Image: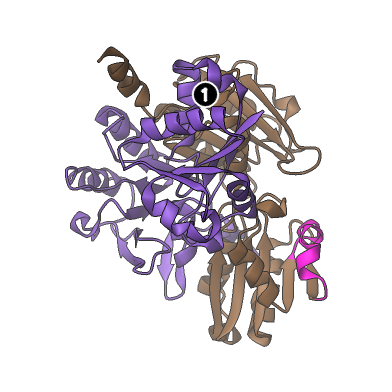
Chain colours: A purple, B brown
Amino acid sequence: MKKLYIIGMGPGDLNYLAPAARKALEQSSDVVAYQLYLDLLDEIIEGKQHHALELGKEIERAELALDLAAEKESVALVSSGDAGIFAMATLVFELLDKQPKDAWNSIDVEVIAGISALQLAASRVGAPLAHDFCAISLSDLLTPWETIDTRIKAAAQGDFVIAFYNPVSKKRDWQLDHAKQVLLKHRPADCPVIIARNLSREDENITVTTLSELDSTQVDMLTLVMVGNSETRAFDKGVYTPRGYSKKLKLEANS
Amino acid sequence: MKKLYIIGMGPGDLNYLAPAARKALEQSSDVVAYQLYLDLLDEIIEGKQHHALELGKEIERAELALDLAAEKESVALVSSGDAGIFAMATLVFELLDKQPKDAWNSIDVEVIAGISALQLAASRVGAPLAHDFCAISLSDLLTPWETIDTRIKAAAQGDFVIAFYNPVSKKRDWQLDHAKQVLLKHRPADCPVIIARNLSREDENITVTTLSELDSTQVDMLTLVMVGNSETRAFDKGVYTPRGYSKKLKLEANS
């Protein structure tokens, strides 16, 4: 079988690139990705065929990866973060399902998971995810706004810790404010919020604020916004969401 | 500063151990973990002080790691998966917040993210997470069942792809069936369900079934159960949840 690896390279810092992903890259003759990711992987993929397609060309990138894989022995399609979370893997499977080409039948597709932005953001401040959580993209480019709005309300009612991907862009500046207003009805105004920008890059910038003070003008497409649940606490050493151990801790202190 | 690394080692297969985690382990004199994880890390932590505490001794394990870190230069506390997701990191921060000891003030705590079970399970079958999703633990050992039930209903209403952690144990055998009944009211009976057991171990076993055919007697504590949303599709090459690209695909086919 020909091989198409769909690789999540993690946040960009190669210290978070899984050995499985490195091996798959090393075995591939061709690497398809957005140019920035090719640059970040430079030391591993030097000498291989690079195929950079600009942002917005996701369908073309997936199709090119499949076409190349049908031709060559082993090809890598690279996303940042986890290839299976808000990334390229689903698009490859959708093409295989909905617009298959005969040549693609010879391809064995293998997805290699990577560290997603919500995980690195959480680790930088402590343990805010900790227990039940959800991830919601605020981009209505491909998802109807009604669906997104329903999910924000459901996440608010379920008191999930929420990681918002694509919170704000130049053309979309009100969705995060809307989410903030919905959440303020369900959790405290001082609920911790983490604003994580340019994760693992040189200019990484992480701030902890509160839900009532969340300012969407400080947020852009390169930012992940994480909102704690009603029990999440910020203190001088970090932010965390208790798993329910405090009851146990108190019992022990009393016994 | 003394250093306490809280490390997510991923699913167990060292091909998913981040280089950042490996470096932190190499720098540590002492490693605190459940015995199975110490065994899996054997080639990296040989010759270091091992501190194994049995399952259920999570508070003791976190406290021991903090006490050791206050004494030594660099100590590692290891969880499987992501240390910040259903794991040890939150407990360390809770102890630092609620039951601090003076000696712990000298400790710099660093969390290192790892691949969580929901990511590996997803990658094994395609791209079922793909877009908005949530993670819910069905264990009511430390969380009131009412809270869990509220989250299941919210996730159902929000049409989130759901990863269920701790779905069934010897003493808890009805919660997954309850979740199934709730979800059947909101999504199709043939909605794909992934049952992933012993991920990345030699006896890894992954099956794809449907919501109506989900059988909780086939599930145990070592299993992750992932339920697709109303758009998730299973076909001969895998399981995926479309991101909404199909509209775009159709437009292109028509143009």
Q: Is residue A250 visible?
A: no
Q: Which residues are magenta?
A: B33-47
Question: What is the magenta segment's predominant secondary structure?
Answer: helix
Q: Picture coordinates of residue B71 (x, y %)?
A: 68, 86
Q: Specify the quadrant that holds the N terminus of chain A.
A: top right
Residue B46 within the segment the image draws in magenta: yes
Residue B33 image-quadrant placement? bottom right
Q: Picture coordinates of residue B50 (x, y %)?
A: 80, 71
Residue A70 image-quadrant placement? top right
- Is B195 situated left or right of A226 in this image? right
Residue B5 image-quadrant placement? bottom right
Question: Of A39 and B116, which appears nearest the observer?
Answer: A39
The residue labelled by disc 1 is B182
Q: Picture coordinates of residue B54 (x, y %)?
A: 79, 60
Q: Is residue B86 above or below residue B27?
A: above
Question: Of A237 and B234, which appears nearest the observer?
Answer: B234
Q: Picture coordinates of residue A207 (x, y %)?
A: 33, 67
Q: Is residue A35 visible?
A: yes
Residue A45 within the segment the image draws in magenta: no
Local secondary structure at mark 1:
helix
- Is A140 situated left or right of A60 in this image? left
